[in-house]
Image (tube, rainbow, N blue to C red):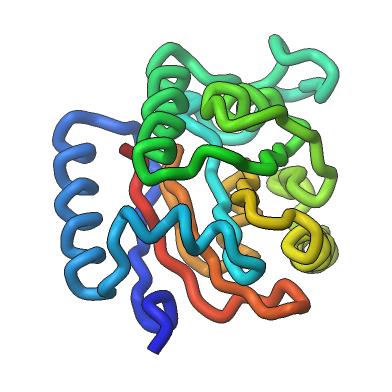
Amino acid sequence: MDPLAEQTITMTPSRPSTVRAIFRSLLLAVAFFHSGLHASDLSDLLKSDAYVLLVRHAYAPGVGDPPGYSLEQCETQRVLNDEGRRQSERMGLWLRRQGVERAAVYSSVWCRCQETARRLQLGPVTIEPALASFFDQPQQAAAQTARLQAFVAQMLRTKKDQALILVTHHVNIRDYLGPDVGSGDMVLARVDAKGKVLGYKVYPSP
């Protein structure tokens, strides 16, 4: 049985804390024990054409964006604070420790996603419209998720043996995969040739 077929973890988005970090570490250990999927397997799975890693941007205080924000002006958006920047760097370090050295990294246009993606330090970051948030336009959820699924299918056919990492938003991950995830959480998804999700595993943010 595929290790992702049954194993799922749901986390509620909230501000990271020492207690939460310890709790998430324990959950991660339990998940590995029960699923048979070890951290060292992650890089091997991501080299295949059946797995993609979706990442929710690191901690950015608040909900949504301020009224009148502009996608061309980071200062008008909700952005990472110092805690979120440190979290992004821990995420990248954790991934490299799992053996993820080469990655095709794509990001939503929102500045908090772009900064998270850059601070992973896993390669150049490319902006991808299919990863853009629909938080302000929930009626666009189905269409945007269809675009994301098609993008995943296309990229998995062409990425060769490098990891495919997509940095996006809570609403995008929830609509595509199902789980609620916290800031900086990473979701390993197993998909078919059309990008349809067959199973997933949540890695709580380190």
Task: Identify the residue at image location x=42%, y=44%.
Answer: 99
Instruction: Please give left or right for residue 115 compared with residue 131 in the image.
Output: left
x and y percentages locating residue 18 in the rendered image: 17, 30
x and y percentages locating residue 30 in the rendered image: 17, 63
Q: Quadrant of residue 83?
A: top left
- Image quarter hosting the N terminus: bottom left
Instruction: Please give left or right for residue 111 compared with residue 188 in the image.
Output: right
Instruction: Please give left or right for residue 58 compared with residue 175 in the image.
Output: left
Q: Is residue 10 above or below residue 136?
A: below
Task: Identify the residue at image location x=77%, y=67%.
Answer: 153
- Image quarter hosting the C terminus: top left
Task: Identify the residue at image location x=62%, y=74%.
Answer: 191
x and y percentages locating residue 129 in the rendered image: 84, 44
Q: Is residue 98 above or below residue 35?
A: above
**Depth check, front residue: 146 or 28:** 28
**Depth check, front residue: 162 or 124:** 162
Report whether residue 139 is seen: no
**Depth check, front residue: 14 or 115:** 115
Report whether residue 83 is seen: yes
Task: Identify the residue at image location x=63%, y=64%.
Answer: 175
x and y percentages locating residue 150 in the rendered image: 82, 66
